[in-house]
Image: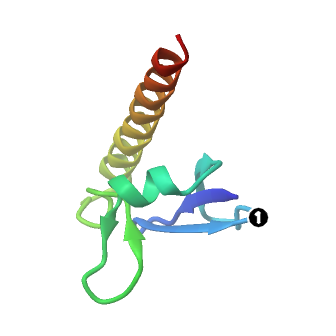
């Protein structure tokens, strides 16, 4: 399952990344569901900072920061699992 994000900050999941969307993550979606901003009105997920971005550069910076957070959390999870195996 791939996660991708639209310029609006909306995160969606699917087998393929549609034209116009940027790839965010491929794998389990639980990590994204934990750190994404949740809509108050429905089940939509958003990359924090992207909807408020005043331009594409700010939006990309917010998306990259979100991606860095995903990587950081996955590394911590992996480190914890390795510690449990020792």
Q: Is residue 36 left or right of residue 5?
A: left
At x 29% / y 89%, what residue is drawn? 41
Residue 2 shown left or right of residue 57 in the figure: right
Spot occupied by residue 34 in the image (x, y as percentages of width and height) = 37, 56
Give residue 18's quadrant in the image: bottom right
Q: Which class describes the residues within 10 Å of circle 1: few (<14), some (14-19), or many (20+)?
A: few
Establish if 25 lies above or below 74. below
Q: Residue at x 65, y 48 (%)?
A: 26
Which residue position holds label 1?
15
Residue projecting furthest to the bottom = 41
Foreground pick, 3 / 73: 73
The quarter holding residue 85 reads top right
- The residue located at (58%, 59%) in the rendering is 4
Coloring applied to the structure: rainbow
Residue 52 image offset from top left, x and y in percent? 23, 64
Q: Nearer the viewer, residue 61 or 40?
A: 40
Quarter of the view holding residue 36: bottom left
- The mark total stands at 1
Q: Is residue 59 above or below residue 51?
A: above
Residue at screen point 30% across, 78% down: 39
The correct choice, above or below, for 32 with respect to 40 in the image is above
> How far across and how far down the image is residue 48, in percent?
29, 57
Q: Nearer the viewer, residue 55 or 9?
A: 9
Q: Secondary structure at mark 1?
A: loop
- Residue 25 drawn at (x, y percent): 58, 48
- Viewed as shown, does residue 49 lie left or right of 20? left
Quarter containing the N terminus: bottom right
């Amino acid at each position: 399952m791939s996660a991708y994000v639209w310029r609006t900050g909306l995160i969606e999941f699917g087998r393929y990344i549609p034209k116009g969307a940027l790839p965010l993550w491929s794998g389990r979606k639980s990590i994204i569901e934990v750190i994404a901003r949740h809509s108050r009105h429905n089940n939509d997920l958003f990359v924090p900072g992207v909807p408020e971005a005043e331009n594409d550069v700010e939006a990309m910076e917010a998306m990259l920061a979100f991606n860095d957070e995903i990587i950081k959390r996955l590394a911590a999870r992996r480190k914890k699992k390795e510690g449990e195996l020792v």
